């Protein structure tokens, strides 16, 4: 009977610690002016805490990448096949591919005018006469 009592006491101790931490967080939130609903939204912003990595990817696709509609629900059948993981990786790959292209285009595009390559005395005089400065 003694080992069972020790095991039950350890489980009870874990529950007490978890409840004490929950109460402390709630009291601290109330002192800072947050009602229980606001505190719940803070700790679980998606409305439901993800139970697997697939659910995390699903939530990212809905709320961050906006690939899936916000009213879409998590499909466990698709999650078993890894649909959300593949979709997120594809979305990120498309984003970075397009991002790199635009960065390369920005680096390649350097406007060059003939007057900026070889400033002549005539062009300097003309600028001085127009604006009273060389710039």
Image: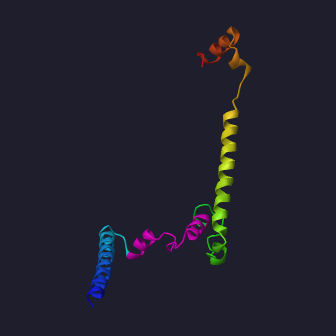
Instruction: Point out the residue furthest to the right here.
Output: 114
Rendering coords of residue 8 (x, y %): 30, 85
Tell me if 130 is positioned left or right of 34 in this view: right
Observer-nearest residue: 113 or 3? 3
Instruction: Give the side of residue 43 with respect to residue 56, left or right.
Output: left
In the image, 81: left or right of 33? right
Residue 70 placement: quadrant:
bottom right
> How many numbered marks, from 0 up?
0
Residue 44: percent from left, percent from top: 46, 71
39 over 135 or under it: above or below: below
Name the one closer to the observer, 63 or 126.
Answer: 63
Counting from the top left corner in percent of width and height, residue 17 is at 30, 75
**Residue 128 location in percent, x, y?**
62, 14
Residue shown at 70% from the left, 10% from the top: 122
Residue 58 lies within the magenta run: yes
Give the residues drawn in magenta, as a range: 36-61
Figure check: 131 above or below 66: above
Quarter that holds the C terminus = top right
Occupied quadrant, residue 107: top right
- Our reading of the magenta stretch's main secondary structure is helix
């Amino acid at each position: 009977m003694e080992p069972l009592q020790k095991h039950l006491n350890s489980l009870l101790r874990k529950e007490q610690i978890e409840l004490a931490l929950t109460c402390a967080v709630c009291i601290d939130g109330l002192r800072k002016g947050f009602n229980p609903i606001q505190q719940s939204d803070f700790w679980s912003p998606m409305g439901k805490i993800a139970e697997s990595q697939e659910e995390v990817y699903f939530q990212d696709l809905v709320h961050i990448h906006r690939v899936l509609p916000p009213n879409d629900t998590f499909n466990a059948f698709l999650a078993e096949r890894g649909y959300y993981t593949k979709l997120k990786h594809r979305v990120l790959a498309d984003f970075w591919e397009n991002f790199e292209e635009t960065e390369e285009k920005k680096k390649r595009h350097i406007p060059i005018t003939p007057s900026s390559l070889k400033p002549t005395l005539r062009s300097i005089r003309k600028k001085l006469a127009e604006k009273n400065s060389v710039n």
